[in-house]
Image (cartoon, rainbow, N blue to C red):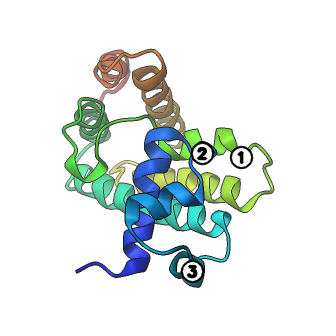
């Protein structure tokens, strides 16, 4: 059985991802988790601490998922294909470990916490940097310009898929990118 801290994090992550961090109060997390308020505050001194824990949980899930998607790339072209094919699965709710697609939890949360110096905003920024580093680590032929392009296209595809209701944005991004890749 899950421990109570993990249940709180899981519950809060699901609610925050579905409805937004600022739309969900501690009482809703308590109600949905079935855990007492005192217990919640034994684990998390504030809502901010709970939000940071959900960001850490989602970060780990996403990094694990992306690592699996990008394994065994032999060319930068293959890396791009695997990256955008993985995103396509996520956008079409076929990436079980990420749940139903509701955009990027980090983009959504950063938008709610606009102060760049806030711990929450910084956690979102660190996630984006870690994702970029992971893509770079799987790039068989290092190419900083291509890395930047992949990351920008990835972010744009996520936003288009969610905000514009274009679940095929990853496929469209890949189709636009492939003619530029020669390896």
Number of marks? 3
The residue depicted at 37 percent of the width and 54 percent of the height is 62
Q: Mark 3 sits on what residue? A: 38
Choose mark 3 or mark 2, whichever is in front.
3
Residue at the (33%, 25%) spot, across then down: 170
- Near mark 1 (Cα within 10 A), the count class, few <14, some 14-19 or many ≥20, is some
Residue under the image location 47 percent in, 52 percent down: 131
Q: State which tag comes first along the sequence, 3 or 1.
A: 3
Q: Is residue 101 above or below residue 138?
A: above
Under circle 1, the secondary element is loop
Q: What's the mark number on residue 155?
A: none
Residue in the picture at 28% in, 78% down: 2
Q: Quadrant of residue 68?
A: bottom left
Q: Is residue 78 above or below residue 117?
A: above
**Position in image of residue 176 (x %, y %):** 36, 15
Q: Are marks 2 and 1 in contact (CB under 8 Å)?
A: yes
Q: Is residue 22 left or right of residue 154?
A: right
Q: Is residue 43 above or below residue 172?
A: below
Q: Position of residue 102 (x, y in %)?
A: 40, 35
Q: Which residue does the numbered mark 2 point to in the structure image?
A: 109
| Cα–Cα gap, marks 2 and 1 | 6 Å
**Residue matched to label 1:** 113
């Amino acid at each position: 059985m899950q421990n109570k801290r993990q249940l709180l994090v899981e519950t809060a992550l699901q609610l925050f991802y579905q409805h937004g961090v600022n739309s969900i109060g501690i009482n809703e997390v308590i109600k949905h988790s079935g855990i007492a308020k005192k217990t919640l505050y034994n684990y998390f001194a504030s809502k901010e601490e709970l939000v940071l824990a959900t960001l850490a949980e989602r970060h780990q899930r996403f990094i694990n998922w992306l690592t699996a998607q990008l394994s065994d790339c032999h060319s930068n072209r293959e890396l791009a294909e695997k990256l955008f094919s993985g995103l396509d699965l996520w956008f079409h709710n076929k990436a079980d470990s990420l749940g139903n697609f509701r955009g990027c939890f980090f983009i959504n949360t950063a938008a709610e916490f606009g102060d760049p110096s806030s711990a929450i905003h910084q956690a979102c920024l660190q996630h984006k940097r870690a994702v970029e580093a992971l893509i770079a680590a799987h790039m068989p032929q290092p190419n900083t310009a291509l890395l930047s392009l992949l990351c920008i296209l990835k972010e744009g595809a996520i936003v288009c898929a969610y905000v514009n209701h274009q679940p095929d944005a990853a496929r469209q991004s890949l189709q636009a990118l492939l003619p530029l890749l020669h390896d």
